[in-house]
Image: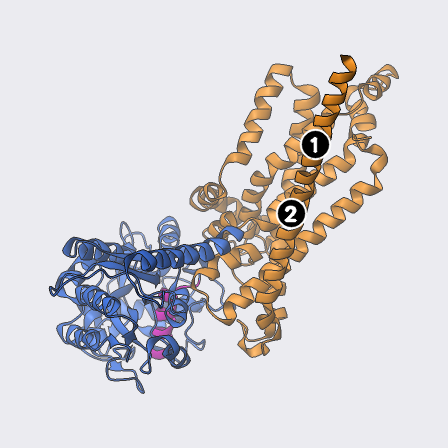
Amino acid sequence: MKALRFGRHAAIAVIAAGALALTSCGSDNATGTAPAGTQGGSGPKVTGTLTGIGASSTGAAMDAWKAGFASANQGATVQYSPDGSGAGRKAIIDGSAQFAGSDAYLKDEELESSKAVCGPDGAINIPVYISPIAVAFNLPGVTELKLDAPTVAKIFRGEIANWNDPAIAALNEGVSLPDLKVTPVNRSDDSGTTTNFTEYLAAAAPEVWTDKASGVWPAALQGENAKGTSGVVKTVTDTPGAITYADDSAVGGSLGTASIKVGEEFVKISAEAAAKAVEAGSPVEGRSENDVAIKLDRKTAASGAYPIVLVSYHVVCSAYDSQETVDLVKAFENYVVSEEGQQAAADSAKSAPLSSSLTEKATAAIESIKVKS
Amino acid sequence: MTATTLTSTQGAGRAGDKIFSGAALAAGCLILAVLFGVALFLVVQAIPALTAPSAEIQGGEGFFAYIWPIVIGTLIAAVIALVIATPIAIGVALFISHFAPRRLAAGLGYVVDLLAAIPSVIYGAWGAAFLAKEISPAYNWLAANMGWLPIFQGPASATGKTILTAGIVLSVMVLPIITSLSREIFLQTPKLHEEAALALGATRWEMIKMSVLPFARPGIISAVMLGLGRALGETMAVALVLSSGALTASLIQSGNQTIAAEIALNFPEASGLKVSTLVAAGLVLFIITLAVNMVARWIISRHKEFSGAN
């Protein structure tokens, strides 16, 4: 507990100190908030250090981006400390990081308070990482199931106690369902995966899932839980009859995954289906035109869209103090949303690449970043 | 010449004394300052959670409604750990100090101390990946045969990741603390007492009952309290092992949560008021631990006459 608390503060302190040190020896930037950007010249290559804080869910993708960006830009490095989405959003608002990774876009009040550091337009959200969330189960002899939102909600609320329940059987004709207790397993830690999963249930099965969407599993519900994605997957793998929700990249081995009913058809989980669901979303209302925050339509009936999906953002300022920082942020974010960057993330984290229209919007938003006037 | 030597030694001694007493004073003040700093941090950070409208606290019913189930959960886990560990630890300590052949005793002592050197995350991983799975048939048996007891009420957890499993893992973790301290205390029992008891015709067990245990009682209590402190504050092992949930009486269903694990699981993604709520939970744990230690001190001071120190 203590180690954790002090660890986080220490990490921030170290980063802050590092940024300060770099500033003091690298450039004559007087504000002390931006990292050193030595004169990069006219070419697209940039140098300097970019500091980010944020979600741990994108950790694997972030590592790939850091490596890819550094190899394309000699002398430029990106530091990212995976302290959590909340910590990241806090850091961008108080100016201790140049960008934040977050499993949720900035709330309206966070956007408002970001204007102090990020200029009159505040911070903007750029979608960088799309990850489908699998409904994974351990049923001996069954690797594929078809489920609809109310059934999934009932299973996770403990209202369906046995796998041979008529509600499941009705959706899965021809599958021999065992007489086995259903053990729903959820995340014990506060998690963006839980937020997105409960958001889907609350939107698609409101009559069953009466709780609000939240990163913390509703405490009143009976059920097992485990820490982290690896924890729930391990627990389900060890327990016949268990079912969980987890990032698709972590599900493997003997676990089966459920196809989810969308409109009139059942959609199997895949990167393409996840990207399609994001495509079907709409821009969040009341944001500047350069903010690419997406309101997902969980009830979408779009053909082939898989609606249980997590979108992770990079939150960046719409304006920075120095040209060096602007160049650095633009170069990095452009790389991240580029085909190359998305492919690197897909290879290392099995995320779903952004669709081309989304990439276009993201690129336009990145290009709008400017120096504070 | 002797006089000169003496004088110079005394001179050096005075300077040394001053330095030493100064260093000791600084160390003493430092620990107070650290403790005060931690307490101050906790209070300042916790105030928003304590003063916030109850609807905004996680769960929507205020801080008290949020904290008391996990306080009870913390105590349940710690009590399970102590109930299991204390008799075993005293038995092991007695065996090492009074029964085992000398060479075996030394080896056994090292092994027990080694248990304390294992990181708690290893215990947690062991509990979550191995113990929980292996112990769940036993829980099913308990639910079937002793289910009339509220603490063994079924249906048992299918994963075995219950507060009882967490308590068992904790008991292994506090075992070396209680054992080492008790062993040291048992070894300090005045030989004359033991020999007098034996000379009066007592058996070995009677000798231990009459001379060793009464002499060691405050020591055992403080050992248990130290173990309790560890069990109350243990974070990683519980976070990994326990399938947490609402407060439940049954020890073999999933449910219950401890303060330390609650903080560890939720802190990384927390922001705003949630951070304050978790820090306030930390403050509560801090107060509980402080109270436990003060009670232990008080018990020991009541039994001062037995203390090996005088």
- Percent from the top left, x then y, of residue B133? 45, 45
Q: Chain of mark 1?
A: B
Percent position (x, y) of residue B224? Answer: 69, 41
Taking the image as shown, residue A8 lies to the left or right of residue A145, namely right
Extent of the magenta region: A190-203
Which chain is tinted orange?
B
Is residue A202 on the magenta stretch? Answer: yes
- Residue B274 visible in the picture: yes
Q: Which mark is residue B15?
A: 1
Q: CA distance from mark 2 to mark 1?
A: 24 Å
Instruction: Out of A285 and B81, give the one closest to the viewer.
Output: A285
Residue B5 position (above or below residue A222): above
Can you tell which mark lies on residue B44? Answer: none
Please give the residue where the numbered disc 2 appears in the rendered image: B31
In reply to whether residue A229 is colored magenta, the answer given is no
Camera sees residue B148: no
x 41%, y 65%: residue? A87
A289 relative to B97 in the view: left or right: left
